[in-house]
Image (cartoon, coloured by chain):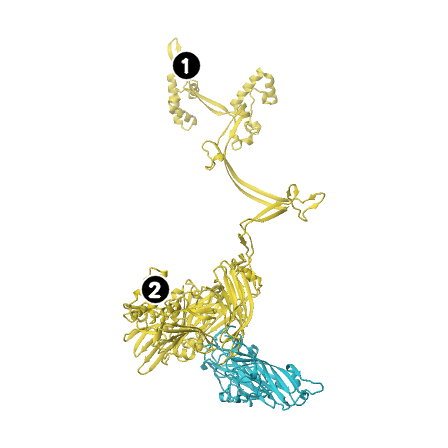
Amino acid sequence: MIIDKIQLAGLDAYFQDPNNPGQINIAGQVTSRTKPLGKGKQLEISAIELLIESDSDLTDLFNFQPNPLFSITVMKEMFPAMFADPFRHRVHSIGGFEDFKCGTLENVKAMDIDGIPTIVSIGTGKVYWISPLYPMPESITINHASWELAASRKTPPENFKYSLKLLKFDSNHNLIQTVHLTNPNNPSQPGNLDPTKPRKAENFDLKDVGFYQIEFTADVKKDTAIYEKHTTLIGKSIGTPLLRAVNLLEPVESVYNIHSLQELLSLSAEYHLFENQGQPIKKMLVTLDLSATLVHSDYAKFMNNDPNDPICFTDPNSFYEFVEITVRTDKLKIVEAKLNGEVLTKSNGK
Amino acid sequence: MYQNSFFPLRTIVGNAIPIGKNSIRKVFESKESGALAMQYDFNLKASIVNTKTDPHYAHYLPIFVINGTTISPGEGMDTLPLPSNPRPFGNDAQVFSFFALSKKKATKDASRKLSARFTLQLPDNFLVGGICFGGFPYLFCSQLQTLSQGVNSANFGLPREVRLTCAGAKTADPKDTSLSFEFLDSDISATKQEVVSHSGFHFLCIDPTLTNVLTVHFSDYPIILTKTEFDTVAKKLSVTEYYGFIIPYFYVFEYKEKTRYRPIVSTGLLGTTTNNNIEKHPFANSIDYKHVIPRSGKTNYFDFTAASIFGQQRTYTIRNEVYDGKKPKGKVKEEFKECFISLKVNPKKNVVLYIEQGEEYERCVAGLKIFLPFIPEVALKEDVEQISAEIKEFYPDSPDIATLIENAPRKDLEKALRRFLKIPRDIDFCEKIGIRVYEIDPLEGVSPLEVPLESKYATLLAEKEIDQLPEISLALFLEGVKFVRPSNSRFFAVELTNLDDKPGQFVVKGMKLVQSAHVSVHPRAARSQQVRTLNFRIIGPNLAEDYALLGNEGFNFSIERFVAGERKGVLFRANSLMDLLHTGAAKIFSNARRRAVEFEKSEIYPAYEDDRLKYLVTGEYELEGGYRFTPNYEKRYSESRLEGWRRSETGHDVEGKADWKGIKQPGEFENIGNQELRTHTNILFPDASLPEWNTAAIFANGMSIIYDGGDVLNAVLTGNSSGLLLPTYKASDNSNVHQLAKGFSKYWKGIDKSTLKVTGNLSISQSPYGYSVSTGQVLDSLVRIFNASDPIAMASLGISLIGLLSTLMPNSPTQFALLLPTLNGLNLGLSLSAAGVGFVANPAPGTLLPSVSQNASSGSQGSITKQASKSGYSYSQFLNNSYDEGKGYTEIEGGEMKRVITRKEVPNTDRQRVKGAEVMWQGELADIITGSIPLNFTLPATAGKMHFRTSDDSLRVRFGSGVGKSISVDFWFDLTEEVIRDDN
């Protein structure tokens, strides 16, 4: 079947005061979030149209303000089961033939599996790979990690066990700290996971990282399906495709932390200033470019497990895909934000 | 994301390459394999027909001991019937079989550590396309493992990892004789590793590689159950397992691209699951029905396995004595034929058969045909009457089935059906069956057996309820179980559900996957596909023959896009070659055609017509007060030599050829004529070297001088013999050249000129009544006298003659020297004298009586005759025969020939054409059309999170009238696939 794609309209298109449903004026330091999408629904956002009105001259706000005037957050399931704002994080992706082969490989081989460079176990011994040491131009913080394994989470748990570590070094290449990514409850301690477990580690906040390295070990018990051409192996059998990539998330300043109206206008496709001769500018319309596609996620987490509970719209421990706008300044009288977007709905017949 | 291509119509499997028995060696075995005392064996069979029996098979079938009773495989269990057609190779292809079984039991998980490698030496360099192998479909596997882990413990006897390495491929560098594998990054190995293998043929395909040496590496061996002991009272179970593998079919094949367009798709069984209650120990209760002959002590069992649904069905023989695996003993009591019979399934419970396409590329599958025999409870009589009427329409003399079975109890009909199917009598058919067919698209690392049918990775394709006879026949024959849309999936699940209200057993006599008549691409559950291009290739010897057609059978196709409920878009349609070419989407590589029959006229240049120049070709004439043309000429130098013979015959009995009739009739062969001939003969005097004749000549010439002195004397004085009375000639005075040869020696060629001496004649006369005649002996003796070879005879004759003469002539001499001349001149006559009448022998001749004499001459005469002739008439007709052999040699030293050639078509010969030979395909002349149509649309993964307008989106290449034999057709899609990152 086909269900038509329609333009988001009506009250649902507006950001509303969560404490005052129906109130679309979110001035007054309100944080407003889009609602969770039901299963089968998708929202494609192209822009946010803002109506900004003030009692005072808006030109005063064209200068850089120490605190942001607005913050816009896009929460996406960037990696399976990991929700983060793609505009607020830089992703370090370690993967590919060069990263794998420049590291140290024991009982593994980097192979092209279904077109993706993958570390594949060889023979039957324990598997070990350590990446090269990556220097950063300046110290960074890494707070989340997600990794891709070739095997699905539906793979039987007894097929293999693995561990993944993030190693932090100083400028003299001395190991300072180890984060055990595969021990989500206690990253400071070693831990192994099986393929059915989530492949993420969050909020471990590794600070002042000047050099880092990734270490992967695995104990493979069973093999899986492969059909590939490769260079010849003498006397060894191919095991299981394992690691494909490790993604480290580094928090960065988002462009959508808008410190001035000048920044707002520079991010916008269109704007209109309501100017009257000799009068201060008190009203403006802005179409802020923001491209995001929101979908329903099976890993969404809600406070009280109820997506309809309004507390989800503010609770920082509710994770689902949303766009959130926070008006941080108190110098505005009216802020109305409307989403420009299209809604898609699908249904798989049973 | 990776590039992929989908080839639903192509096969690359060429002929099987012959491998000699001594061409395979085991070159490696892992140490774990050695530790388990793995016994490897391999043998070569001349044909797949010879794989039906092998002494190895029995070692892979388990024995069960239940409460002390030993149940071993029955007669026929240890056979391997031929796979059903179409098979990948013909019966005349040699096939290898590999076997391995450890001597030590399997006590720990060592599968992945077991491996062996074999080297195959091919008889020559072949363009290898890969290997094809197949397992033993009837091995017992652990249901627990299947249900919990999605693996088949026995894996149909196949190692889970098979690797092929082409070691013999050479580099092409003229200065180097290295092998390709000496490049450090040469991808010369291809590995196929599966979580679970199916029961049919497997293909490990590689890029076409010219090589004569291959290496095959087997690894990750399955477990073979050989014995299980149950004690149902003590609830004790023990199993005896060994590691090993069994590969009855192993081929190496050549790479050859061909079209593969036929309804049946080769398929294999992956495994079976059920949601019916089964006991939770590994081998206690299998889904396949096991028929045990009721005996005490020792007995046999017979399996009715799910793997047999595709046609490999064993024949079992039950005798009155137990079969112990050696020679059958006892009388035959019954025969069974294997098919799939399930355990007893409770109402609303199911059995699921997981199957996999068993060809080298996935095909578009439109549905399946399945034979579920049972005697329906519903509307049986009416259905039989209807079917009987339908049969009678085509076969009027057929018996009325409805009447035959009208009053037969259902139970009897079921008995008859069991007998017809050759299955045990205690089988309780399930009579209301729900069939559902799912397409399975598992994520990576997940076995297809582990995909729940209600998950988003299983897509329902067909649903059907069978409880009536027409539905049984439809499912088998006509409609089959048709899918809602064709599927390109490799894996399917066929769920049989007991919709009846009592337990029953599913009996599946046969099942086949049926290919779609068209080619299509559809969304998949676990993969997003971006369809970039549709490519096609049409090859045939007569494609470019007529632009109004595509091949001799009028092949045509159209490319259609279906999006949910919208009107379909026809992207492309081609009913003729012109349709294909005019859009620019296709290119043709064809052999040039030209007329086979043409009229050609060649005129020498310059040519004239009505006294005027017919053509004036620029540069080929000069104007010089008229027209001047350089002449046409040819300079040749030639030598030849002929040798032969001629024969002319004429005369009586010479006849010409029988078919010379009418004006060709030659008439008599004769040579006649008349002529007036005048001759002058100069008779030659004998050679003057003969004294007797020289004397005579001197005498005659002397007398002539006396009587006619002038000329003769002059001749004597001058030596000019022409004036002599007797001109003489002496050869010795003329360089020993006889007179007959003088000035004529050339013409005496072939005759000895020394014999041409003229010697004159010697005459002998005798009386016919003389002594020498009357007594031939005396004459003979006389000859011998002068031969002087018989002096005794000579003396005897002399005495006789003397005696005779003295009687006749008293005064005759008696000396022998005077005797003969006397006898020579002796005349006999009468004489009258005074003394009276007397008989007188008188040497002087007498004339009173006629003189009768016998004359003979000897000697030689010569004459020189000059003739002049005048023909009055001459006629000659000869029959000629001749034969010539010749050798010739000609050099053309130069020449110039100017011609004007005019060509015209010959009416009614336009369709006769001759093809060029520029384009070949696989060694045959062919026209080739290739093309590609950019598509660039996306088929989303239906299990993915991202939404698209619809997932009901497909592209189909529809063949209007099938493919036909005169052309080879291939359509394939270039795709970019991405496995969805859905870890749910």
Q: Which percent across, then down, holds residue B634?
A: 63, 44
Q: Quadrant of residue B227?
A: bottom left
Q: Amino acid at mark 1?
A: Leu
For marks 1 and 2, give the one nearer the viewer. Answer: 2
* Colour of the chain lettered A: cyan
Whole-percent x and y of residue B277? 36, 80
Using the image, name the chain to which the residue with label 1 belongs. Answer: B
Residue A179, compared with residue B90, is above or below; it is below
Residue nearest the observer in this picture, B261 or B872: B261
Residue ID for mark 2: B388
Look at the picture and state if B271 lies above or below B818. below
Residue B493, numbered circle: none
Q: Residues at badges 1 and 2 in contact (C-beta under 8 Å)? A: no
Q: CA distance from mark 1 to mark 2?
A: 137 Å
Q: Indicate whether A162 appears above or below B519.
A: below
Q: Is residue A2 visible?
A: yes
Say which amino acid is labelled 2. Answer: Ser
Give residue B737's position: percent from left, percent from top: 55, 29
Q: Which chain is yellow?
A: B
